[in-house]
Amino acid sequence: RIQVLEMEQAEKHLEDIDNSTSNYIDGSTNELSDASAIKVRVSDKNVLIKILCKKQKGLMSRIYMEMEKMNLCEVDVRVMPFGSDALDITILAQMLSELCVTVKDIVDHLEMAFLSPPHHDKQD
């Protein structure tokens, strides 16, 4: 009974959003689309971010900038190549401020990192 209550409580505190509405990989040509897939989960002050995207120069610095704007502190970041021209990025972060950032806000800010032009003075 206690485990059931703990799981129900955990589910209440867990917010989840997935903005990947289209297929990231085009099965007919096996080419990456320009779209990215961003999934965000929030539990209390902990934030788990999963991103599958096309490789871009300066992308990680733009992601870090957007996270800083939202007062998110990176606890752990994993970047792995996925195929020859894609990245699988997993970020574990914590909210620093008392202002709670919504999952939609996080996704919107991270999408800005993909829309911003790459900085030519930085390399990832």
Image (cartoon, rainbow, N blue to C red):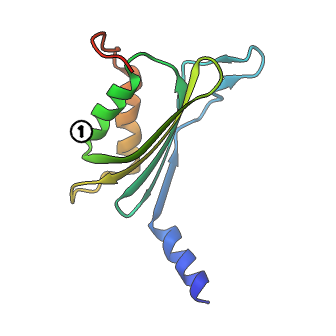
Residue 90 picture location, percent across and down: 50, 41
> Left or right: 90 with respect to 4?
left
Residue 120 picture location, percent across and down: 31, 9
> Left or right: 91 with respect to 100?
right
Element type where label 1 sits in the image: helix
**The residue under label 1 is which amino acid type?**
Lys
Residue 15 picture location, percent across and down: 47, 58
> Left or right: 117 with respect to 54?
left
Q: Nearer the viewer, residue 121 or 14?
A: 121
Residue 124 picture location, percent across and down: 39, 21
Q: Nearer the viewer, residue 54 or 124?
A: 124
Question: Callout 1: few (<14), some (14-19), or many (20+) C-alpha neighbours within 10 Å?
Answer: few
Residue that appears at 59% across and 17% down = 85
Residue that appears at 30% across and 14% down = 119
Q: Which residue is mark 1?
A: 69
Residue that appears at 27% across and 11% down = 121
Quarter that holds the N terminus: bottom right
- Residue that extends furthest to the right in the rendered view of this protein: 28
Residue that appears at 50% across and 48% down = 17
